[in-house]
Image (cartoon, rainbow, N blue to C red):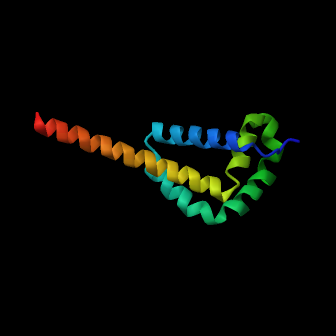
Amino acid sequence: MLWDEPTAEEQESIIKRVAEAIYKYDMDLFAILFLESIKPLSTVGSQLTRYLLAPFIPFVGEKSIPYLATFENRENLEKLIRLLEEKSKQDEAKKKERKERDKKK
């Protein structure tokens, strides 16, 4: 079926890839703010997306279907937000360590 649900491993992989892409372009703060604001409407939005994008899937490509199916689930949005927050905290800690090393020099 076209809208098959991805497995748990595929979902984890998709979440990590999306988080890395967001973090790569330094959009983590904006993404967290955006995802937190749309989280309450994620179920309605995902159903609307399925309805509106269904005719365009052949043009967009079937590779987008697992992404859409993954982020329909509010829990997966929360996982993405937590992953982005963790990466941001790790980056902040690295920056502090570099500043402390530079001060010692």
At x 51%, y 48%, the residue is 83
Give coordinates of residue 55: x percent, y percent: 83, 44
- Of all residues shown, which one is farthest toward the left? 105
Question: Left or right of 40: which side holds 58?
Answer: right
The reply to whether residue 61 is in sight is no
Q: In what quadrant of the picture does the N terminus appear?
A: top right
At x 74%, y 42%, the residue is 7
- Of all residues shown, which one is farthest toward the front? 9
At x 11%, y 33%, the residue is 105
Question: Left or right of 7: which side holds 17?
Answer: left
The reply to whether residue 31 is in sight is yes
- The number of discs equals 0
- Choose between 99 and 26: the one closer to the eye: 99
Give coordinates of residue 63: x percent, y percent: 73, 35
At x 31%, y 40%, the residue is 94
Quadrant housing residue 16: top right
- Choose between 14 and 37: the one closer to the eye: 14
- Of all residues shown, which one is farthest toward the right? 1
Question: Left or right of 105: which side holds 62?
Answer: right
Q: Is residue 46 above or below residue 13?
A: below
Give coordinates of residue 92: x percent, y percent: 33, 46
